[in-house]
Amino acid sequence: MKAPGHSLRRFLYRILGLGLVIGLISTIVIIGLAPIPEDAAYIGSDACSAYHWHEYKGWHGSRYPKMMSRVDRKDVVVADFDAEDAPFDSPYLYNAVMAATPSG
């Protein structure tokens, strides 16, 4: 014997699930159709901090903002991964690079 309200609860879960699926699909379509302005540019992390202070504080205090650097700075070393005398001749590295390469 089913508990009272069982079918109503199941119906509400189905409606909720359908709403979530429709919302997700709509979001993906809207984002996919949104035009990217031609003058779009990186505005920097400081611009985000004004509106998202809590997230910015956690991110800025971690190692993530220091992981990637702009290559046009004087103190940044850019490796030549295609060099013939590269010190990292490893089949594991080769396989990882080939797997990450679209033509590989």
Image: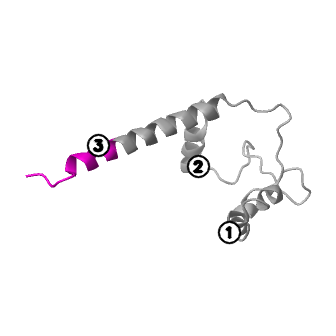
Is tag 1's residue or tag 3's residue first in the polypeptide sequence? 3
Mark 1 neighbour class, 10 Å CA radius: few under 14, some 14 to 19, many 20 or more:
few
Identify the residue at image location x=47%, y=35%. Answer: 22
Q: Which residue is mark 1?
A: 58
Residue 42 disc label: none
- 94 or 65: which is nearer to us? 65
Say left or right for 7 vs 2.
Answer: right
Quick one: quadrant of the C terminus? Answer: top right
Q: Disc 1 vs disc 3: which is toward the camera?
A: 3
Which stretch is magenta?
Answer: 1-14
**Image quarter of residue 56:** bottom right
Between marks 1 and 2, how big is the CA–CA gap? Answer: 32 Å
Check disc 2: other Cα within 10 Å, few if <14, some if 14-19, many if 20+: few
How has the structure been colored for display? one colour
Q: Which residue is mark 3?
A: 11
- Which x, y percent locates residue 63? 69, 67
**20 or 12, which is in the foreground?**
12
Q: Secondary structure at mark 1?
A: helix
Residue 4, position as x, y percentages in the image: 17, 54
* x 58%, y 31%: residue: 29
Ranked by sequence position, the earlier of labels 1 and 2 is 1
Q: Earlier in the sequence, mark 2 or mark 3?
A: 3
Of helix, strand and loop, which one carries label 2?
helix
In the displayed image of the protein, which residue is found farthest to the bottom? 61
Is residue 3 located in the magenta-colored stretch of the structure? yes
Q: CA distance from mark 1 to mark 3?
A: 41 Å
Dominant secondary-structure state across the stretch colored magenta = helix
